[in-house]
């Protein structure tokens, strides 16, 4: 039986996950965590555990269906925990970040902060691009 070096093991592990490949499971994970509701939920939970209703009020525009679905995905992925109280009906007391979720939350907070800090520059770049290429319709990205 052949043995491998630590370097070979590291290379094999690195090759096992390559999000550039369509069949790689990390691509699905990237798709999930790149969603706008995921980032906003994680950033909100960075302030500490919160009730569903508090998250719903804080994140303007998220539907009950999307908030529920996103929280379930985050819980399944081990990023969020849900604390419930037994009863009829069962009551969810709060949602909180796990250690894994806290690591991702830090990155998402950076993205949110960057977007808030640099929106005017991005908006100006969009306006300049649109002025140079009036025939292309990419979408309405104006401040709103």
Image: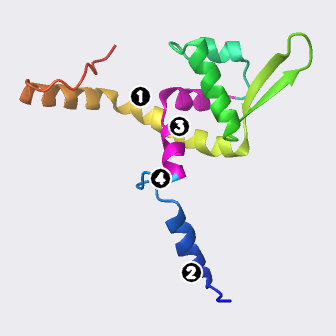
| Mark toward the start of the polypeptide (1 vs 2) | 2
Are the residues at dot 1 and dot 2 in contact (C-beta closer than 8 Å)?
no
Distance CA(mark 2)–CA(mark 4): 25 Å
For the magenta stretch, what is the residue range?
Answer: 25-47
**Which numbered tag is attached to residue 23?**
4
Are the residues at dot 2 and dot 4 in contact (C-beta closer than 8 Å)?
no
* Residue at the spot 50% in from the left edge and 67% down from the top edge: 15
* Eye-nearest disc, 1 or 2: 2
- The C terminus, quarter of image: top left
Are the residues at dot 2 and dot 3 in contact (C-beta closer than 8 Å)?
no
- Residue beneath disc 2: 7
Q: Position of residue 92 (x, y in %)?
A: 80, 19
- Residue beneath disc 1: 116
| Mark toward the start of the polypeptide (3 vs 4) | 4
**Is residue 116 shown above or below 34?**
above
Q: Position of residue 30 (x, y in %)?
A: 50, 44
Distance CA(mark 4)–CA(mark 1): 34 Å
**Residue 35 falls inside the magenta stretch:** yes
| Mark toward the start of the polypeptide (4 vs 1) | 4
| Element on which disc 2 rests | helix
**Is residue 66 shown above or below 21?**
above
- Residue beneath disc 3: 32
| Element on which disc 4 rests | loop
Label 4: few (<14), some or many (≥20) within 10 Å?
Answer: few
- The N terminus, quarter of image: bottom right
**Residue 69 falls inside the magenta stretch:** no
């Amino acid at each position: 039986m052949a043995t491998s070096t630590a370097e070979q093991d590291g290379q094999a592990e690195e090759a096992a996950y390559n999000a550039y490949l369509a069949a790689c499971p990390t691509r699905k994970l990237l798709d999930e965590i790149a969603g706008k509701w995921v980032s906003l939920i994680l950033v909100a939970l960075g302030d500490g555990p919160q009730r569903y209703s508090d998250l719903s009020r804080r994140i303007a525009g998220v539907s009950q269906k999307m908030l529920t679905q996103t929280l379930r995905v985050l819980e399944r992925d081990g990023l969020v925990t849900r604390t419930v109280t037994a009863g009829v009906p069962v009551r969810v007391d709060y949602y909180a970040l796990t250690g894994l979720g806290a690591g991702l939350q830090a990155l998402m907070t950076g993205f949110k902060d960057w977007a808030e800090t640099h929106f005017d520059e991005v908006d100006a770049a969009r306006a300049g691009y649109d002025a140079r290429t009036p025939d292309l319709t990419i979408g309405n990205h104006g401040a709103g």
